[in-house]
């Protein structure tokens, strides 16, 4: 037998697109002419990053960092692994971290501390979604797309046990017998 994940739609692609466009306008206003480095947190931010940078019509760099506090399932392990360090100095650069979900805040706060030690000129956070009800450590989100309920989300780059990243819309998962 076994339980089956059932997907319920949370945000369709039009809603996601509207949120990404608004974020792009805010980021353009603040970073135009600054030649920032956008650092996406893998893997969940890859689709968001791809859509976002196509709306940013000014010089910038794109990097990715592997950092995760999650194990294979849907429970946080409380531990954060950083699997990459910048191949060039970010000292003195304007760094914008791109995240899919701020949940407990452990991953993002750890990573922001890690990057801050490398002395960027500025360090800000852009998150597609925020799950404030789950927060364990405070995280300041400078650019926020969508606030989400305490549900397990998938789609638009976000996975459940590595599945569903390819879905163009965002869903929440419920386990049904
Ligand atoms: P945090 O460290 O608890 O804030 O978790 C951040 C990371 O956990 C996010 O970057 C996601 O990769 C993952 N995560 C948190 N909530 C969800 C979810 O609802 N679905 C899938 N991944 C999630
Ligand atoms: Mg992530």
Image: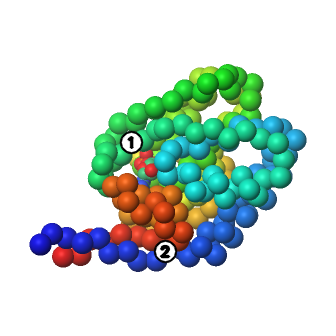
Q: Secondary structure at mark 2?
A: strand
Is disc 2's CB within 8 Å of ligand 1? no
Residue nearest the observer in this picture, 138 or 144: 144
Residue 165 position (above or below residue 117) = below
Q: Find residue 156 and report its horizontal and vertical position in percent.
A: 52, 63
Which of the two discs, 2 and 1, labels the residue nearer the N terminus?
Answer: 2
Is disc 1's CB within 8 Å of ligand 1? yes
Point out which mark residue 69 bears: 1
Residue 41 position (above or below residue 3) = above
Q: Find residue 58 and report its horizontal and vertical position in percent.
A: 84, 47
Question: Image quadrant for the N terminus?
Answer: bottom left
Residue at the front extreme of this rendering? 166
Residue at the left extreme of this rendering? 1
Q: Find residue 100 and report its horizontal and vertical position in percent.
A: 53, 54
Q: Residue at x 46, y 60 (%)?
A: 165
Q: Find residue 27 and report its horizontal and vertical position in percent.
A: 76, 51
Please state the total of marks drawn on the protein image: 2
Q: Residues within 10 Å of mark 1 (few under 14, many from 20)?
A: some
Residue 2 position (above or below residue 35) = below
Q: Secondary structure at mark 1?
A: strand
Q: Residues within 10 Å of mark 2 (few under 14, many from 20)?
A: some
Please state if 38 lies on the left or on the right of 10 as rendered. Answer: right
Point out which mark residue 47 bears: none
Residue at the right extreme of this rendering? 33
Please state if 121 lies on the left or on the right of 71 as rendered. Answer: right
Q: Residue at x 68, y 26 (%)?
A: 90
Residue, disc 2: 10
Q: Is residue 148 visible?
A: no
Q: Residue at x 42, y 63 (%)?
A: 164
């Amino acid at each position: 037998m076994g339980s089956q994940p059932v997907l319920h739609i949370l945000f369709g692609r039009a809603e996601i697109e509207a949120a990404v466009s608004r974020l792009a306008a805010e980021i353009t206003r603040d970073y135009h002419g600054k030649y920032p480095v956008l650092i996406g947190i893998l893997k969940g931010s890859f689709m968001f990053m791809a859509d976002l940078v196509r709306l940013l019509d000014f010089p910038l760099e794109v990097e990715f960092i592997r950092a995760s506090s999650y194990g294979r399932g849907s429970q946080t392990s409380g531990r954060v692994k950083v699997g990459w360090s910048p191949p060039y100095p970010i000292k003195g650069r304007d760094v914008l971290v791109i995240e899919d979900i701020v949940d407990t805040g452990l991953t993002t706060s750890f990573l922001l501390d890690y990057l801050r030690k490398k002395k960027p000129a500025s360090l800000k956070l852009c998150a597609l979604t925020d799950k404030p009800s789950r927060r364990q450590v405070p995280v300041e989100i400078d650019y926020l797309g969508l606030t989400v309920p305490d549900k397990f989300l998938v789609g638009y780059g976000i996975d459940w046990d590595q599945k569903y990243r390819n879905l163009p819309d965002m869903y929440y998962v419920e386990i049904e017998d």
